[in-house]
Amino acid sequence: MPILLLVSIIAFSLFYLSPGDPAEILLTGPQGPPDPATVLEFREREGFNDPAAVLYLRWLSKVVQGDLGYSYVSGGKVLDAVLSSFHPTLRLALISLMISLIISFPLGILSAVKQGSVIDGLGMTISLLGVSVPNFWLAYLLIILFALKLDILPVAGYGQEGDVEHLILPAITLGISAAAVTSRMIRSSMLEALEQDYITAARARGLSERMVVLRHALRNALLPVITVVSLNFTYLLNGSAVVETVFAWPGIGNLMTRSIFSRDYPVILGCMLFLAMLTLALNFLTDICYYYLNPRLRHVAGN
Amino acid sequence: MLQGIDPGFRLSIFIIAALFLLAITAAWIAPHDPENAQPQLRLKDPGGEYPLGTDHLGRCIFSRVVFGIRISLFIGLVVVLLSALIGTILGGAAGYFGGVLDEVIMRVVDAFLSFPSIFLALAVIGFLGSGLSNLMLSIILVEWTGYARLVRSEVLSLQGREFLEAAKSLGASDLYIMSRHILPNILPSVLVMATLSVGYAILGAASLSFLGLGVQPPTPEWGSMMNDARPFIRSHPLMMVFPGTAITVTVLAFHLLGDGIREKLNPRFEVDKQL
């Protein structure tokens, strides 16, 4: 709870420090900027002149009731704009998450099992490249190859609801970027598991290497991987800011950048709060998963 | 001196040394003024007087890429230095003094960490405006939390060690203990994290500039050069390839350097932040 309060204070302070005058922005219509007297009168009437703390509390009481205010640009409810842009982001993120896990699990496990081999070196080089290539650069490389040279996929856009073609390039871009980080984590957590005594014991019992790796090492390496999956989701959200802009994908990252250009402060604030809540919820979910999957934690808590 | 060092580490040292050299000598190496627009020479293919061609305003791409090193290194180093400084002071204070101060500082860190990093940076720029100083501020606000957490846990792990008890019983002041006993012990970890995050800082700055929210034209910066190249992706893809490659090579070099230093000093942690 206190963390939510701090989150809202950080968000509001940034908003409060912004150089623009919200009253003036609100009053600017198609006929141009309002005259200063109107602005002064409006500020007085709507209570814009109150101290920051009062403004914050008034804003907070609205936010708590689910009222994030109205967009300066469209005039629509901020909450509606944020929620409707979250759907495409979630869709993209889930597919990218799958791609990322499909790449990173085999890569990470193989690199760990064959530590120091050519496969390991190659895998780690690829993942290092993956972390170093900016995702917008990867996006354009894919666009140049698949959309412009081969002409088999659309350059950008969302297409119709349920359309898969438009999803492929952005999902691969995000998936590869996330896989680069994830495979390194899976590798190091597998390496750690493989060093444990029970692995030596399993080998001593004459179990096949396959059995040792999959049944004994992987199972124990999986716990940290839960964190990896949830971290992955955060990477994907982060990546979405840029990748959605490149592919004109109508998600929350795109909404955020567009709102910055149009100085639509309520929408920026709304996106910020929404994403912070999402991250906190995700962390909470991760903790719960940890608790259920780790018998040690369960027993400690049970006592 | 470089005997026995793995090839990746050696490569990174070589690349980074070359980058610094190029950054210093940019004015002599670049054949043209990177900001000089000559519309009659726009979108020339690479070759001849313009080794990498010209952009949509007729500016020499090679000169812009070379001058771009300066701003990227500047951003990377300043951002990392300041966020390490802020994070170390706050995290150190939290770990050393504990109690309410610790609680307050760490809750603020948690609050900052609840924003997905690039969105926090975007919000800072969205509210305070774009430009070089706000760009750096936005990345510092994202990065400092990592150092605060790291330093706090390192300081906590030192608590109760004999040399600290000895210093305390001799009546050393807090400031003396922190600067003479604690700082030297935590410095290696901070150094590793700092090296690893130079790459991320450069990448983050390039991303934000690519979105048009960082370094503003006509200043030569790789991310904003790629942004300029977007409308010409079909006809002149090379205009995007050169700055894109420059970012990748630079970030890769700093990652390799960080990995190399980590292996030498061997502290156990992962930098899991990416803008």
Image: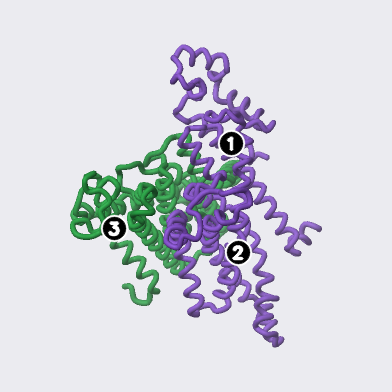
C-alpha distance separating marks 1 and 2? 31 Å
Amino acid at circle 3? Phe
x and y percentages locating residue A293 in the rendered image: 73, 62
- Residue A256 at what x, y percent from top left? 52, 40
Question: Chain B in the picture: what colour?
Answer: green
Chain ID of residue with mark 3: B
Q: Give the quadrant of the C terminus of chain A.
A: bottom right
The residue that label 3 is drawn on is B20
Q: Which residue is mark 1?
A: A270
Please name the residue shown 62% across and 48% down the image: A161
Label 3 Cα neighbours within 10 Å, binned few <14 / some 14-19 / many ≥20: some
Q: Are marks 3 and 1 in contact (CB under 8 Å)?
A: no
Q: Nearer the viewer, mark 2 or mark 3?
A: 2
Which residue type does callout 1 highlight?
A: Gly
- Mark nearest the camera among 3 and 1 is 1
* Chain letter, disc 2 residue: A
Q: Where A73 sits versus A253, above or below?
A: above
Q: Is residue B149 above or below residue A124?
A: above
Taking the view exactly as shown, the residue that stands out farthest to the right is A303
Work out whether residue B39 or residue A25 is closer to the camera in this orientation and state it: B39
Kindly indicate which chain is depicted in purple in the rendered structure.
A
Indicate the quadrant where residue A205 lies: bottom right
Does any portion of residue B207 appear in the rendered image? yes
Q: How far apart are labels 2 and 3 at the CA level?
A: 38 Å
Label 1, secondary structure: give it: helix
Q: x and y percent of residue B121 in the render?
A: 48, 43
Q: Which residue is drawn at the image coordinates 45% and 34% (left, top)?
A: B128
For the N terminus of chain A, which image quadrant? top right
**Is residue A91 found left or right of A130 in the rendered image?**
right
Three-letter code, disc 2: Leu
The local secondary structure at tag 2 comes to helix
